[in-house]
Amino acid sequence: MAGAMGQRLAELIAEYEVPGSALAYWHQGELHEFAAGTLNVDTGVEATTDALYQIGSVTKVWTATLIMQQVEQGRLTLDTPVIEVLPEFRVADPEVTKNVTIRHLLSHTSGIDGDQFIDTGRGDDCVEKYVEACATLAQNHLLGVTQSYCNSGFVIAGRVLEQLTGKRWDDVLREGICEPLGLTHTWTLPEDVLRFRAAMGHEDGKTAPVWGLMRSMGPAGLICARPADVVAFGRAHLEGGLLENPAAMWEPQVDIPNPYTLGRQWGIGWIIDEWSGHKVISHGGNTIGQHAMLWAVPGTGTVVCVTANGGRSGEFTRAVATELFAELDGLTVPPAPSLPETPAGVDVAPYAGVYERAGARITVSVLDDGKARLRLEATGELAALQEPEESDFVPVDENLFLFQAPGTRDWMAAVFFELADGTLYMHMGARATPKVG
């Protein structure tokens, strides 16, 4: 695949209905770059290797790296309470306000309800205002007891950086990562992205209703970059150039209750998995109609970034990784979950009910024939951008269920588990959602 990647990428975007994609990978001392398709179906602008894509939550690893630079400089530790750096910081639970640490934020173990997407304006105080608005955020789970993906935590971490440096998060990023690595095609603000060829997101084959997320979410997901720049960032975590000890970020901090979606464990920023006996560190990102993935294999030195601007993008990036890593490093990417050959004899009634957290409501219902249905609803400011979705909800065993999002073919996993207090949770899409009714 590596040798014929230009043709193969074009074939894969057609198969997975992706308008445009770019791919870069570093292998055995060489950088390879490819692109296929279009950046915008309305304008027909060709996808090129130097075009900027929204890499979404891959940004979180960059923010975590900036925090680790401050740790290495002795300005704080991973176990520093947030309130020591941000005296004004508050969430709804006073004990969490007092005790939540930097480590909790960067490993998604704070329990703070994490999908608060609010627009606090385009001013340079947008991150500060976002953190002020966290004062009403409730707990999704008790502090430190499990993992649940938390966008809010990374915006708070971005504010920690602003407080420590006296600069905007955007400028901390440029000075701490982009300039040392010579990244010329990595930006955060639309007025900078406009100077380059840039991808537009697509939903259902049409251009998305808006281009990007609100500026307040910057530290959690607003980097736009070409894949080659993202690969250079990934290389710095294997070869050095940003941190004295980048491997500290690969140390597992928590097991992920649902290991079927992203990986088995979370480190500091990075997701950690194992493929064919090799440690793999990775992160993905999704914005409005755009998707990106970054993988790095410390044992081989291979780093891969692939982007997509719509279509069945998650299935597409999995397909790229499956073919590419098999050829480059002889690694087998864990396949997507699949239905059992014979139906599992699981009583689905105990799982029926409503599960809810900030930004999402999930309903499991049982039909007359005993089968289960799943309904996913976005809530909050992003609700207008996503219609409710329903699908069959098929048990594989007592804790693992599978479902298909509309328009996709891969099965996605949901794992049920209980915490020590007896609360039932559904872990889906890296998030733990409690049963509320």
Image (cartoon, helix red, strand yellow):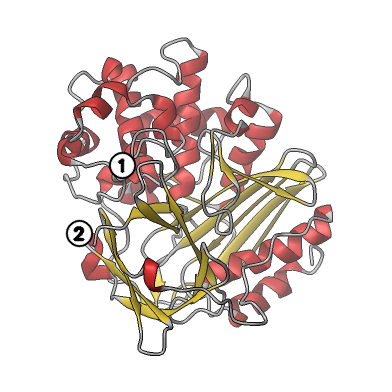
* Residue 192, horizontal then vertical, whole percent: 36, 47
As drawn, the label of residue 152 is: 1
Contact (CB < 8 A) between labels 1 and 2? Answer: no
Q: Is residue 105 above or below residue 57?
A: above
Residue 67 falls in image quadrant? top left
Q: Is residue 385 above or below residue 248?
A: below
Q: Amino acid at mark 1?
A: Ser
Q: Amino acid at mark 2?
A: Glu
Residue wearing tag 2:
381
Name of the residue lying farthest toward the top: 74
Q: Earlier in the sequence, mark 1 or mark 2?
A: 1
Instruction: Kindly identify the residue that appears in the image at 82 percent across and 64 percent down.
Output: 3
Q: Nearer the viewer, residue 125 or 318?
A: 318
Q: Is residue 379 visible?
A: yes
* Residue 435, horizontal then vertical, whole percent: 31, 58
Q: Is residue 47 visible?
A: no
Real-space CA distance between mark 1 and mark 2, rounded to the nearest whole angstrom: 14 Å
Q: Nearer the viewer, residue 148 or 326?
A: 148
Instruction: Kindly identify the residue that appears in the image at 45 percent across and 21 percent down.
Output: 78
Q: Secondary structure at mark 2?
A: helix
Q: Is residue 220 left or right of residue 131?
A: right
Quadrant where the N terminus sits is bottom right
Neighbours of disc 1 within 10 Å: few (<14), some (14-19), many (20+): many
